Amino acid sequence: MTGPRILPWALGLIVALLANNAWADRQAKSGYAYLREETRQMQDDEFENPGYLAVDKGQELFRRRPDSGRSCASCHGQEGAKLDAKRLARYPVYDKSMGGIVRLQDRIRNCQEQRARTKALPYHDPDLLALETFVRHLAAGEAVNVQTDGSMASLLKKGEAIYRTRFGLIDMSCAHCHEMYTGQYIRGQRISQGMGNGFPAYRLDTGEMANLDLCIKQCLTLMRAEPFMPDSEESRLLGAYIMSRSNGLRIETPAVRY
């Protein structure tokens, strides 16, 4: 006498539920924990870490006066001394006046338009990434502390739904890689938990700086899916959820990632 048959879809559901239960008990780890030792050494050395070139470039742009005469430093001090590291660690934040979730790059672009009276840099522009890297670096060592209650609670649930949605020809979700297959190898590299505490980061596979939004775009492209537009609600929701998963981890910008 044979036992009851388990349909393939039911078996998949069981595996997913087990994976989610396992994740619930798993301690959050930075992507740093999954790097090779030589890559960790690169990140830790300011002279070897390519991301510090973006920090230096961002600092230069931070001080530069546009035609309007107001630089970032005009409001925030030459070295960004007037910026609060703990507040920077809260990004993305909820701002009703700006229509919802506001990422650090959104805040910079808004300041360019409203305060510097200059044209905002395009999303993913190297100069915008450099500015974001410099500002985020000012909070290095602070614990990520994204709001998870109040107005953000329902938005983070929407972000989690996107995180668990299958995309593209590969038919996988973010959760497949960063929950179910964490620690396994792909192309010789270990899959991390997909935390956002190191971003903006220098990516070894592309040889460029990437903030979390650009990293999401690159992942969706690898999944053979249509990437979200950088100013889309989906991008903001997913990025906010990923950063909320990183709560408690120290900011490492500029990190080095694969």
Image (spheres, rainbow, N blue to C red):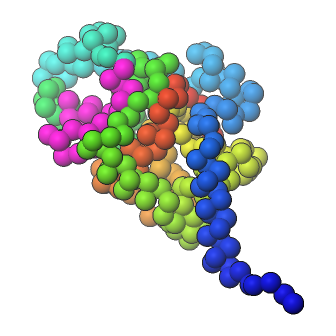
Residue 194 belongs to magenta span: no
Residue 116 lies left or right of residue 27; in this view the side is: left
Q: Between 256 and 127, which is closer to the camera in this rendering?
A: 256
Q: Is residue 236 left or right of residue 116?
A: right
Q: Residue at x 52, y 66 (%)?
A: 166
Residue 105 horizontal/vertical position (percent): 32, 36
Nearest the viewer among 66 and 258 is: 258
Q: Residue furthest right?
A: 1
Say whether residue 164 is left or right of residue 183.
left
Residue at figure coordinates x 17%, y 41% from the top left? 96
Residue at the spot x=16%, y=19% of the render? Answer: 70
Query: Which residues make up the magenta segment?
Result: 86-111
Location of residue 253 in the rendering, given as x and y in whole percent from the top left corner: 49, 26
Task: Using the rendered view, name the quadrant where residue 190 is placed.
Answer: top right
| Residue 106 visible in this rendered orientation of the protein | no
For the N terminus, give its image quadrant.
bottom right
The outermost residue toward the bottom is 1
Residue 41's spot in the image, x, y percent?
69, 22
Residue drawn at (50%, 18%) of the image: 141
Left or right, 9 with reference to 101 = right
